[in-house]
Image (cartoon, rainbow, N blue to C red):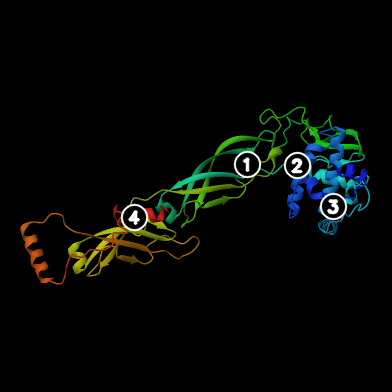
Amino acid sequence: MRRADLVRAGLDVARDYYGILGVDKDATDQDLKRAYRKLARELHPDVNPAEEAQQRFAEVSTAYEVLTDPEKRRIVDLGGDPLDPGGGGMGGGFPGGFGGGGLGDVFEAFFGGGMSDGGGGRGPRSRVQPGSDALLGMSLTLEECATGLTKQITVDTAILCDLCHGKGTHGDSEPATCGTCQGNGQVQSMQRSILGNVVTMRTCPTCRGVGEVIPDPCQKCTGDGRVRARRDISVKVPAGVGDGMRIRLSGQGEVGPGGGPAGDLYVEIDEAEHPLFVREEQTLHASLTVPMADAALGAETTVETLIDGEAGVQIPAGTQPGDTVVLRGKGVPKLRSNQRGDLVLHLDVVVPSRMDAKQTEALEKFRALRTKDTVQMGSARGNGGGGIFSKLRDVFAGR
């Protein structure tokens, strides 16, 4: 039973403002606004002219006004009615800020147009609008990311029309005032309701809110002031960029409607996988196989670095599988810095699978001297196979 029916029956019942909006008592202001917006779209007289919908719309608007007022909401939460504690109905119309032009302000915020007692509106918008940003991918090798370079790329974007230079008109012709909206950029419709004369403002469908039309458009851009074209531009890639980073090229994006200022172009780096090195920010990792004898006795060797050519490596005596050797400053440069990362070599000790008679005899003598070395059983955790380099790739790929 509606509250008005209860009042007519002699029962004094406070309005359930939360129930009218269909929200819980702990609803936030955003929840209230969302609920009101949903109901208003269903019940507004322009959408639903039924008398019951108009009454319901008035209730919903009142409930929203009450619950968005902190003091009135406090009274509601205490069990009272801040509008009409002892009377019936909905208080005879819109209370507080929803009288007169206040309701128009609410609907202007919710529905994108103005609503008032006698017209008005926001006026026409400019035909010249800013352009959008553009995004383009660029594939680079690890070496290119580490050293930096200048690279030519081809982009396909909207550019300024070179025939009308953004005017959108043909020759010396000029835009004309829109005959549909008389240059206002909006058209209005009026409807009588329980609220009075309700004027709803909408964007003009002819000029799309600009307030003017182009009777004689440019033959190349058809009045848009811009055309699509492919062009080559140079991109300076700084040393130290990495996968997923973006380089911003100001003003190289899409030219806006009416020849408006261009947006920015963002070039996103796609770093290719390297056959030898795995990158972790500025640090490089690689696998280095070491013969068993060199691991036991120690040795010197050379390795190929990413950008510095060959570098000497000292293998310590007694090296164990999985040990690492760090070459300082042989990694990737830090972006916009003179600092360099390191190259970490993960040592993989290789045991010979085949030996000749002399090698076997020498190793037998060595084993006879190592009487304390015995075969021992240990945990199998971590034995995934695939080699050190494969495990490195799994780790840095997040697998």
User: Which image quadrant for residue 368?
Assistant: bottom left
Mark 3 to mark 1 CA distance (whole Å):
46 Å
Q: Amino acid at mark 4?
A: Lys
* Alpha carbon distance from label 4 to label 3: 64 Å
Contact check, label 1 and label 2, Cβ < 8 Å: no
Q: Which residue is mark 2?
A: 38
Residues under numbered marks 2 and 4 in contact, where contact means CB atoms less than 8 Å apart:
no
Specify which label sits upstream in the sequence, 3 or 1.
3
Query: In this rendering, which labeled residue sits more in front, label 4 or label 3?
Result: 3
Q: In the rendering, which numbered label is found on residue 391? A: 4
Lower sequence index among marks 2 and 4: 2
Q: Which residue is mark 3?
A: 66
Q: Assess disc 3: are there few (<14), some (14-19) or many (≥20) residues with their C-alpha within 10 Å of its C-alpha.
A: many
**Which amino acid lies under the numbered mark 3 shown in the image of this protein?**
Val
The location of residue 75, given as percent across then percent down, is 85, 58
Q: Kindly state the secondary structure of the residue where label 2 is placed.
A: helix
For the residue pair 348 and 251, the one nearer the viewer reads as 348
Front of the two marks 1 and 4: 4
Between discs 1 and 2, the one toward the N terminus: 2
Badge 1 is on which residue? 254
Circle 3 SS class: helix
Position of 186 with respect to 251 (left or right) is: right
